[in-house]
Image (cartoon, grey):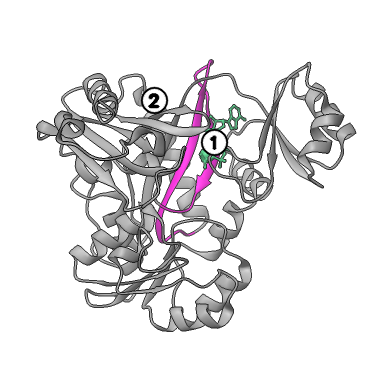
Amino acid sequence: MTQLIGPGSTIGIMGAGQLGRMLAVSARQMGYRVAVFGGDRTSPAGQISDRAWSNPFDDQDALAEFAAACDVVTYEFENISAEAAATISKHVPLRPGVELLSTAQNRFAEKSALSQLGLTTAGFRMVHSADELTSARSDFGGRIILKANTEGYDGKGQWAIDEDTDIPALWNDAGLTGALVEQRIDFEFELSIVAGRYDNGNCVFFDPMLNHHANHILDVSVSASPLISDQTRREAIRMARSVLEHFDVVGVLCIELFLDRNGRLLVNEIAPRPHNSGHLTIEAYNCSQFELQLRTICGLPSADLQRRAPAAAMSNLLGQHLPAAWTVDNLAAFDRPETHLHLYGKPEARTNRKMGHITVTAEHASEAERVARRCREQLLK
Ligand code: ATP
Ligand code: MG
């Protein structure tokens, strides 16, 4: 049984972005102290924290000092080195765990682990040359994606390849020594499931979200979409449970999935942390994905997840969606109680930078999605 890490204790967060910020808000609400690593007091999470370290992630002395000031450490992004994880683990529990972390930061290791668990993924293999890439293209039916094996996010470090792609030129430009190739799935839609596991083995699941991407970045997530059948829901839960149990997770994770044209569910990747698609849980559930992260890593009592609204949708706010200066007109669409604006406290609104999101709850998913999109458009009116 995990020892209770009670209110008043310090939650350490590796990373100082919006996921850390929303966890910090939950933690503060319940009387915890917050320490962040990877950003100063002006960073999104640093603004809500008691202490912040802006040192680089490989500064082992600073990591040791940070960990010694915390009662438990969690992370909001996956690219934490094994050495950094070891330094932290010497002082405090690192949750949801080092094995999950190291697997999730290496796409090949991740896909291999998923298929060993018996979960379906797109066909995949490592390639180390233009010739191997050419063979992979023909073996996987002509349409593939080349992915840098480590450190990609928001589709960065990915190349879509078709029959007519000039592979030697692409391989040369990409400048990789080895990379993952995946069969390109012609999917019906993308979805994700956020789940948590307590130390006593109790697993809880939010309903899967249907996700729309734009320019390889999550654009809109919808909860309670009628397009997700009960069978797909059950299958997503089964997949998430097997990952939670296999890695003996204590914490929260998200699994990104594709539903293909034959109704098969395939796992794309694991995020070992709360996920952008789960932001709508803040308003749509009794316990958000961030409160769930806090509850699980601190050994608090487990809460059943219950909806507060029949359906919800979230639209992401990127730099280009925000006005240069706010006027009351920009906020006119937020005149209804079901519309919620979140901003992450980032000073500079660059194109494609995640600046905030909008959540809308409704009786039906289609209404929630329509209003979430309309509120976003209204911001630039
Ligand atoms: P993110 O940070 O947004 O999760 P990422 O850089 O980690 O992205 P992936 O999630 O692997 O990368 O891929 C980004 C998007 O590219 C997916 O959400 C999907 O739209 C598309 N994609 C990735 N792999 C495949 C595939 N095998 N078949 C079809 N589409 C894919
Ligand atoms: Mg992804």
State the residue position of label 2: 231
Secondary element under disc 1, as helix, strand or loop, is strand
Q: Is residue 274 visible?
A: yes
Q: Is residue 65 left or right of residue 112?
A: left
| Residue drawn at 25 percent across, 36 percent down | 359
Q: In the rendered structure, which disc, 1 or 2, sits on the residue that comes first in sequence?
A: 2
Determine the quadrant in which ligand 1 lies. top right
Span highlighted in magenta in the image: 248-273
| Residue drawn at 43 percent across, 31 percent down | 191
Q: x%, y% of residue 303?
A: 22, 54
Looking at the rendered structure, the kind of residue marked 1 is: Val
State the residue position of label 1: 267
Q: Few, some or many C-alpha atoms within 10 Å of disc 2 (few <14, some 14-19, many ≥20)?
A: few
Looking at the rendered structure, the kind of residue marked 2 is: Gln
**Residue 207 is a magenta residue:** no
Q: x%, y% of residue 16?
A: 41, 61
